[in-house]
Image (spheres, coloured by chain):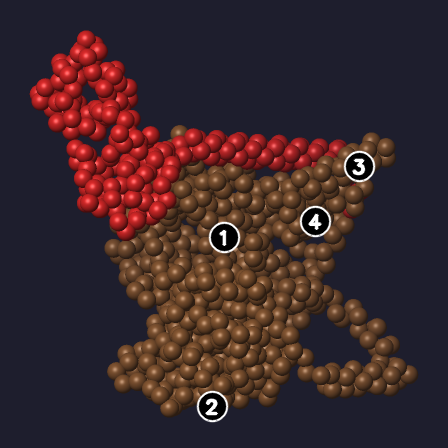
Chain colours: A red, B brown
Amino acid sequence: MLDSLSKKAQVLILLALGVMIFFAGVKYQENRLTSVMMEKSALQVEQKSVVQAPKTLTVHVVGAVAKPGVYTLEEGKRIHDLIQLASLLPEADTTLINLAAPLQDGKQVYVPFKGEATAGGTPQKTGAPGDGLININTAGIKELDSLPGIGPALAQRIIDYRENHGNFAAVEDITKVSGIGPSTLQKFKHLITVK
Amino acid sequence: MTGSSLHIRQRPLLALTCFYGLGIIFGFYFKGSLWWLILGGLTFLVNVVYFIRKGKLQSTLFLLCFVFFGALWYNLHCLPPDSYRHWLDEVVEGQGTVISYPRPGAAGLSFVVDLHRLSRGEQELPGGISVLLRTKGEAQVLPGTVVAVRGKLSLPRQARNPGEFDYRQYLANGQIFYQLTTQDNGLTVISEGQGIRTWLAREREKIASHLAQIIPRKERGLLLGVLFGDKSGIPDTDYEAYQRAGVVHLFAVSGLHVGFVLGLVWALLSFWEVRPLFRLLLGAGCLTVYFFLVGWTASIVRAIIMALVGLVALTMGKKQDLYTTLALAALIILMINPGELLQTGFQLSFVTTAGLIYMTPWLENLGLGKILAPAVAAQLAGIPLGAYYFNQISLVAPFLNIIAVGASGIIVGLAMIGSILYFVWPPLGDPFFLGAGGLLYALSEFILWWGRQEWTGLIVPTPPLALIVILYAFLFLAPHLYNFIPYWRSFLRPVYRQRILTAFIIIGMTCFLWPHMGKTQVVFLDVGQGDSIFIKTPGGKTILLDGGGTPGSDYSIGKQVLKPFLRRQGLRKIDLVIMSHSDTDHSEGLLEVIPYFTVGQIIVPPLEQGDKVEEALLQVARKRNIPLNSVTAGQYIQVDDQVRLEVLHPDGERIWHGNNKSLVLKLIYQEAEWLLTGDIENEAIAYLLDQKEDLRADILKLPHHGSISSYSEEFYRQVGPWAVIVSAGINKFNHPHPRVRGYFSERGIPFYLTRDNGAIITWSKGRKIEVRPFIPCL
């Protein structure tokens, strides 16, 4: 069949076929490369999303709960969510704590028993009961007022600062509140805590 | 023209094209670019070595290499690249050029965009893919326009029921693998395209809108169809009638039109003394212009290539070999896009042309005459494909085509002259357009009259592929049958005659006495959220139980899913239409499909006063004179010798409402049993269990789309199915319920869901029931 063609024509169609197969190979390789590249970038996206995994916070719950202990929850959860996990005891008094308050990392939450009066009426009772330190992140005006060198006005400023800038990370941070300098801090440093 | 013999040995190009096509088919069935690349490369090297050694090519070896190359080329072009699958169902942004004329569809416009750039957020992909863009807007976007798009990337709809048009495969064969659905204002035109393509597209648009002003809508749709192959202006029902009459090819721009363009050029040039080469170039130029006006379709590309080769041969004073020209046209198209080989348009265009060339001389010799012979030849060649794709065999086509082709020749001519004059000075074209429109109207009315007569077209079930191949082999050999006559004579000599007769009798008896190997088929159609079950008995009786429905949507399940499916079965009549109960997701499709078929009987559960659906059904039954019967538990319908439908629910003792009124039917064929439960819920299930009915069945269609309100372990135990089927689509009712699914998966009982599997086809020869999901499980 192909014998009827001249030798020139035979060389030509053989060459043409060779070129086409070569281009097919190139196209195959192109397809493969794109697909490998996509695979990679899809992987990167996944890795990124691992880094951006929802942040968590860890809190300690004690008091009138069936399962006290350390819990790790997603950021943005409320005390209510925590108490559900820890199973409230029937004798717990939830009117004394603000169930809607957002949880803060590294905090202890104390659920009071019925008939128990809260000190200062703060939602998140601070510190181990009886350590005597005042938590500047949770303390009310009265407690702050009781500190040496702090009057009602400064106490209010501390609270305002707390509300505007968030909690104090360290005791020293209280000096950022205008009116409280390092020298003032020296007077009550041993009396306060941030945890 | 060499008549009815191919002499493939003297036509190397024809052989190459055939083997290349064969390769594409292999490539379609056996996928894997790498393997085809290795095979192709190796055989190529062997060819080279052979050539160097012997100084010539070895034909078989070379053709083999071409087969591998065809398979490789198809795999490279028509398999979706993996790269984009990570972005499915995500919002992406891109920029590209529109390359097709917009096509109006059910949900807005769709057109093909060649994307240069595609990105998602910060990630960017190399562009260079074409996507089908779907947009709700009425934007005037013509080919050549550069657009920026923002939308969701997804896969086009695949076929979900037997016989359904596989849009995904169709697009893939055109190298389009994804669709992009624009989101709120996701389509912005960056620049109106420049260059000849956009300019021509705009002119085409001008002609179309001018036509809208001067001639009625119906003729305008037809005229745009004949002139540009734009079928969007022709109503579906009319199109079907044209199909039955076998004249739809008039709406595919092809040789007729190309011939006219060239004829016009020649006629104009005959006034001057023009050199042949110049004439050739001018003809080619005009054809290119026409090509841009129409867009890429296999038929026009084929016609243009053939015409150009013809012109070249004429200019050079050589004889044109039609088979080689046809092969060249096919080879060029298939090189550009190998997927075309699997498209209906390509196949019809080439097969009818080949048939025309091959069989006309033979038919003329038989005495059909110069006019009838080509018409019959083209029609004969098209019959197997027509039966395969459209389930139609037109009986009047050859006769109608002589008139239609002749008349449409005049129409196309008038319209083309009109278009040219329109550019000179618009009103000048009007008389020609009006004339073409008027003629077209008369022609279409004439054809439609024939097309609407039911007897003019046979409806046949889709033939198996093997039969198509046999039919074409027969058509191929037909002109040579008389060559075999001497053999027949010797075969029928008295010595043999007796033996042959005995052989025939023995074969006949065996066939007659052979146990009737009939099968009962039950197809659970995928109608989205709803039920529709089609049953076919060994005796050929057909039952349609429920018809799906899309409450609150314009989409018609009856017309879009049921009708094509039933037509693919070659049906014009449904013996039994059964409505399990009147919920729209079971009944709507039935009401839509009944008008298209002759219905033997309608079966319903006991009727209720004031049910709108039931009233509508009663009305249809009365209007079309269909007997309508309601049945209750204890009755049965003997559908066929060996097939019966037992009614298990509802019984006449109690009055049932809503879902619990659903008919529960048991289909029994010898030892095979299907339990079809409609939408019954716990109340009816408990009642059924109380009645101590025999519920055992091999296949259970779970009640109420697998809802938790029908969850009953006792019921499942009593039925004891070895496979269950749920008919449910995407829904907000949590169908099927995970607990229902869990029950069966825990016990290892196959669980088929139409949402995942598409239609679920079950059949039995009387003992075991076979199940085949239309979309295989992943």
* Nearest to N terminus: mark 3 or mark 4: 4
Nearer the observer, disc 1 or disc 4? 1
Q: Nearer the viewer, residue B24 or B632?
A: B632
Mark found first going from the N terminus, 2 or 3: 3
Residue identified by numbered label 3: B46
Q: Position of residue A82 (x, y in %)?
A: 32, 42
Give a yes or no on whether discs 1 and 2 share a subunit. yes
Above or below: residue B374 compared with residue B328:
below
The residue identified by callout 2 is B634
Q: Chain of mark 3?
A: B
Callout 2: SS: loop
Q: Could you say which is closer to the camera, residue B23 or residue B205?
A: B23
- Provide the secondary structure element on which disc 4 rests: helix
Of mark 1 and mark 2, the one earlier in the sequence is 1
Quadrant placement of the N terminus of chain B: bottom right
Residue B61 point in image, percent of width and height: 79, 43
Q: Which dot marks residue B19?
A: 4
The chain letter under disc 4 is B
What's the residue at 68%, 83% (across, down)? Answer: B516
The amino acid at mark 1 is Arg
